[in-house]
Image (cartoon, helix red, strand yellow):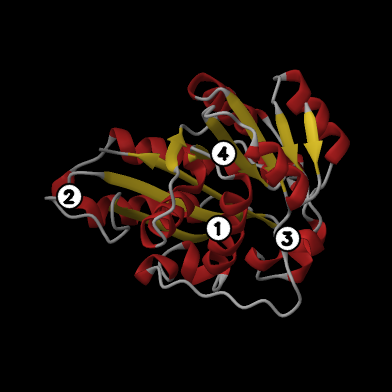
Amino acid sequence: MKIFTTKKEIAQYFTHKENKIVGFVPTMGALHQGHLSLIKQAQQNSAEVACSIFVNPTQFNDPKDLEKYPRPIAADIAMLEQVNCDILFNPTVNEIYDDNEKWHLNIGDLEHLLEGEFRPGHYQGVTQVVYKLFSIVKPDVAFFGQKDYQQFMVISKMVELLNMPVKLVMCPIQRESDGLAMSSRNIHLTPADRSNALILSKTLNWVKYNFNADDIPALKQQAELMISNQPGIELEYLEIVDGKTLHPATANTKSIVALVAARAGKTRLIDNMLIA
């Protein structure tokens, strides 16, 4: 695996890519099997696969959250080598950002719904860094996990607005054997937190199997109650929405997704499930 730490090095490398299809998996490191599933998906659809590891400061609202975000780079490199990833781009903050850099992209109400409401400014940071990474790596196809469903929609909107020549692919959520969605944040869970957090995937499954388009408000209310009644869990939101707009689903909505965010102890987790 080739490792690049500067924009110049990786840009020079890709200048000679000879019309190969380049697949790209942007990450913030602390890799797990969910990330590796994206690499494997990229390998099936690309001649060469690049992964980036960059903990992006502009998408964190809470400086403490940024500070405690795990950065096990040696373990990450070993995992990427195990799955035969071709390229790692691992830049410093100073390599990506200049001082006092300004960025704002009008992505409409996607910015303020759900995650946007609880993490103001988050998606400006996401679009800022993904735009930079796409501009540096110039991938043909980029792969993202469904767990960050809203993020995928935001990046899709950015690609559309800025007319970027990259195809986006959303890959299924990878789960632990007990149903917990894989996440870099799971390492912060105590055994009790982890056990309590299972209510999130259990509730999403319950919504899926009990879905009734004519009674969505009652379904949502019951699902909220299931999570709120779980000790050690603080629910932020559970929404059943149109998968194309993130506005509340109605009886006529064709594409439906249920999304949840909650705190298990001190750790904030998100999850979702495609319903229809």
State the residue position of label 1. Answer: 131
Residue sitting at x 51%, y 29%? 21
Q: Is residue 183 above or below residue 87?
A: below
Q: Quadrant of the C terminus?
A: top left
Tag 1 secondary structure = helix
Q: Are marks 4 and 3 in contact (CB under 8 Å)?
A: no
Q: Quadrant of the N terminus?
A: top right
Q: x, y percentage for residue 13?
A: 71, 37
Q: Amino acid at mark 1?
A: Tyr
For discs 4 and 1, the disc positioned in front in the rendered view: 1
Residue 180 in view in this figure: no
23 vs 14, left or right, is left
123 vs 212, left or right, is right
Earlier residue among tags 3 and 1? 3
Earlier residue among tags 3 and 2? 3
Earlier residue among tags 4 and 3? 3
State the residue position of label 3. Answer: 96
State the residue position of label 2. Answer: 253
Frontmost residue, 29 versus 265: 29
78 vs 228, left or right, is right
Residue sitting at x 44%, y 53%? 164
State the residue position of label 4. Answer: 198
